[in-house]
Image (cartoon, helix red, strand yellow):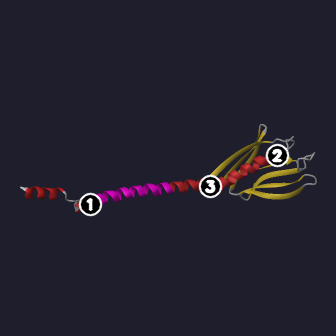
Amino acid sequence: MRTIIIKKRQRNLRGFTLVELMITMVIMSAVGLAIGVVIVDGQSSWSHMYERINSDVVTDGYVARKKFDVVMRNASREKILLGDAGSWIEVYYYASDSSTVVDRYARFYAADGDLNLEYGQLEPRATLGIDIVCGNVTACTFRNVGQSTQMILTLDNGTQANTVVSSAITHNQ
């Protein structure tokens, strides 16, 4: 009778069969592959979003908006000149805090795909410099809206387009 009990125990203590191991391996491979696909897709989406946010179109738009804001806020309210159809804008400002008369000018205009800022002396009229504010410019329009001045700038680098609208109010009398 003892021999029968020992044989039953040996049968109950056996391990996994080869078929069970193969099925488990196939299931684990499918799960691992699915997790890998999700990780790769997430990384690809993140990289695409990062490239869009940090593209030259976005950074150029940010730089142009900041530069326009700074120049317009320092400009005098005395005289703001707009070109035909808003193609350029010219403002006057004080050379320093101790100046008693408006003696400098700044002019924004688009040319050859760039937004340029020309600045100089009023009397006698002399250009002191021209800075390229940003590139990838396809359209740029300036206009007065109430007491503020507005710049509508469209940037396009061939793969991404961005339109920047910036308004500023002059602060100096």
Q: Residue furthest bottom?
A: 18
Task: Please tell me whether residue 27 belongs to the stretch shown in magenta.
Answer: yes
Residue 146, placed above or below residue 62: above
Q: Which residue lies furthest to the front in this view?
A: 2
The answer for how far apart the CA atoms under marks 1 and 3 are is: 49 Å
Q: Which quadrant is the C terminus positioned in? A: top right
Three-letter amino acid code at the position of disc 1:
Leu
Direction from residue 93 to residue 137 in the image, left or right: left
Q: Which residue is the site of mark 3?
A: 54
Q: Which residue is the site of mark 1?
A: 21
Residue count near mark 2 (Cα–Cα under 10 Å), binned few <14, some 14–19, many ≥20: some
Q: Quadrant of residue 8?
A: bottom left
Whether residue 134 is visible to the viewer of this picture, yes or no, is yes
Task: Please tell me whether residue 44 belongs to the stretch shown in magenta.
Answer: no
Query: Could you say where residue 30 lies in the image, as x and y percent from the top left?
Result: 35, 57
- The structure residue drawn at horizontal position 33% and vertical position 57%, both measured from the top left corner, is 28
**Looking at the image, which is closer to me, 109 or 97?**
97
Q: Quadrant of residue 55?
A: bottom right
Question: Looking at the image, is mark 2 or mark 1 nearer the viewer?
Answer: 1
Residue 116, placed above or below residue 101: below
Three-letter amino acid code at the position of disc 3:
Asn
Give the extent of the magenta segment. 21-43
Compare marks 1 and 3 and give the one earlier in the sequence: 1
Residue 56, placed above or below residue 82: below
Residue 159, placed above or below residue 145: below
The local secondary structure at tag 1 comes to helix
**Looking at the image, which is closer to me, 59 or 31?**
31
The local secondary structure at tag 3 comes to loop
Three-letter amino acid code at the position of disc 2:
Asn
Query: Could you say where residue 147 lies in the image, as x and y percent from the top left?
Result: 79, 38
Q: Which residue is the site of mark 2?
A: 74
The label on residue 97 is: none
